[in-house]
Image (cartoon, rainbow, N blue to C red):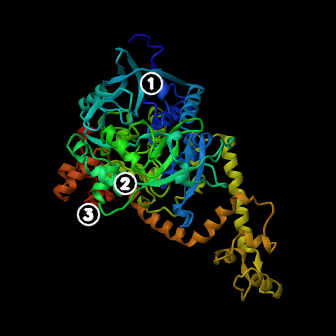
Amino acid sequence: MNRSSKYCYDVLVVGGGHSGIEASMAASRLNMKTALVTMNVDAIGQMPCNPAIGGLGKSQIVREIDALGGCIGQLADATAIQYRMLNRKKGPAVWSLRTQNDKNRYRLESRKLLFSQNNLDIIQEEVVDFQITGNQCTGVVTSAGETIQARAVILTPGTFLNGKIFIGLNASHAGRMGEFSADSLSAGLNRLGLKMGRLKTGTPCRIDKRTIYWKKLEPQSGDSVHPLFSYWYTPELLPQVDCYLTFTNSQTHQRISENLDRSPLYTGKITGTGPRYCPSIEDKVFRFPDRERHQIFLEPEGIDSYEIYANGISTSLPYDVQIDILHSIEGLEKARMIRPGYAVEYDYVQPTQLKPDLECRAVSNLFLAGQINGTSGYEEAAGQGLIAGINAVHKINEQEPVVLRRDQAYIGVLIDDLVTKGIDEPYRMFTSRAEYRLQLRFDNADSRLATIGKTVGLLSSKHFQKYTTKQKLIDRELIRLNTQKVSPSNDNQKRFQDLGLPEINRHITLNELLRRPGFDYEVLRKMNLVDYDFPEEYEENILIHIRYEGYIARQAEEVGRFDQLEKIRIPENFDYSSAQALSTEARQKLSETRPVSLGQASRIPGITPAALTALSILIQKGTNINRTTE
């Protein structure tokens, strides 16, 4: 191999998006000689779709990455130009932070972070194939004919695999507007025998903000008081901006309906499956003909940018139709389109071919993360990248993989859903996907995962000390609230009356008091019942813990029962084809997914309780082991 000393690495990451950033940062920080190979160094950390981080279910993933020692939360806070906590009127299990971000600053901050990292080389090259030795991936081949060797390879190509962009009936090969697709790499994956498919996503047009009638629109301001994504970093906040709300109308819908014959979605040009929960505007109009209007959020792409992201009108209709659509909308009558919307169709690998640590079952030392596994969204990609980066290092060091459970993290839910159930449309995280969401909240990701981050080696001692100090203060406060009591004295009853709160008829602890409607720390403060050494920023954590303690305890019992199934491991060389006690369907599904435990097997669609019982008996007997694979 030419220049072997220069091109030999422990971990090689292909792709510089959100997944590749987390994977390469994790591997290099864990003392591995790491390379990130990308087709365009200038596009590292690009936000090709909406310039925002977080949202429902996604903000929990960002917090979890931060608690483990990843970097997307840090980057989001450093570039945020608006913060909003969503779902505040609902329970804390679904509270979700969302930031509007300065797109250009996010890209520059990402590059600065990577280029300043020790043990990490950045290489601008196109990867076109894999170097395979036996059944192991030992490197990659570039378009320049170089072979870059590595002990583990992490593939994070985003939408670039055989990517194709559509604007109307015109199509061109590209992974993003203006960037080449990775057609050869997709062919290389096919040669490895991996089962692949096609997915579709899209993006709306960008509008010149100087051509919008802002006074006609409804401003959407951010929160003046808000938490940060990162537990560990407090950035200097950028100037905050407003977003604006407008709507489509009957004229808009008529123009779209008249031109469906020019849409690649409805003429068979696009064959990939699109995201059900984020459809294009033509899809919304077609599927919901009774809807009089659809929301459009106009989101600034940056403080210094003239571009506005028109969230809600993602489309692949022709250029002239997109102009007509814009001009039919209130406030956009004279809007100038800077960039048209488009659809992008790309290849993905069916993720049931992966182990729970994101390593390919068929090709050892090859890990896949991000949109190649059928997900959509920056946050889902980043979570996979972090786990793939950690596990590539663990594979090299012959350590046990890090596999987060469904009751530990949304990242655990995400990866378990992918490798166990697979996908038939782009996977997007929602709080409803997590059966244990009461304990997987935005506020407590550090208590769930900081210890794992420290054990793995990504969370620094300084940051872990910050977490342990916080936990000691919270534990001390919980003890105080469980022991300090309030009496039904005349003075106390009078205070309750003055505050418009119900009286008490016996001595009760502060814990019991805070469980009652209307009682919070503000009430305790007015009654001089607070510990003034306890930081106010942790009061919300305490209130949530107290009010949901009973529900969480019941969930913990349920987790314990399911944990028994997770402890029953299935041998890697278990031969399902000879397990006659299982139905043909069960044998087929189990052979395809190859679950690592009885718990994972129970989550495979179509696996019945009877099949689980039969499988459990076969495991206990130690039969059906394929000795030829040992």
In the rendered image of this protein, does residue 220 appear above or below residue 26? Answer: below
Q: What residue is shown with label 3?
A: 608
Sooner in the amino-acid sequence: mark 1 or mark 3:
1
Vertical comparison of 262 with 396: above or below: below
Q: Classify mark 3: residues with Cα within 10 Å, few (<14), some (14-19) or many (20+).
A: some
Tell me the tag on residue 277.
2
What is the three-letter code of the residue carrying label 3?
Thr
- From the image, state whether disc 2 or disc 3 is nearer to you: 2
Alpha carbon separation for disc pair 1 and 3 = 48 Å
Residue 281 seen: yes
Q: Residue at x 18, y 56 (%)?
A: 585
* Residue 399 % position (x, y): 47, 38
Element type where label 3 sits in the image: loop
* Pointer 2 local density, CA inside 10 Å: few below 14, some 14–19, many at least 20: few
Q: CA distance from mark 1 to mark 2?
A: 30 Å
Q: Are marks 1 and 3 in contact (CB under 8 Å)?
A: no
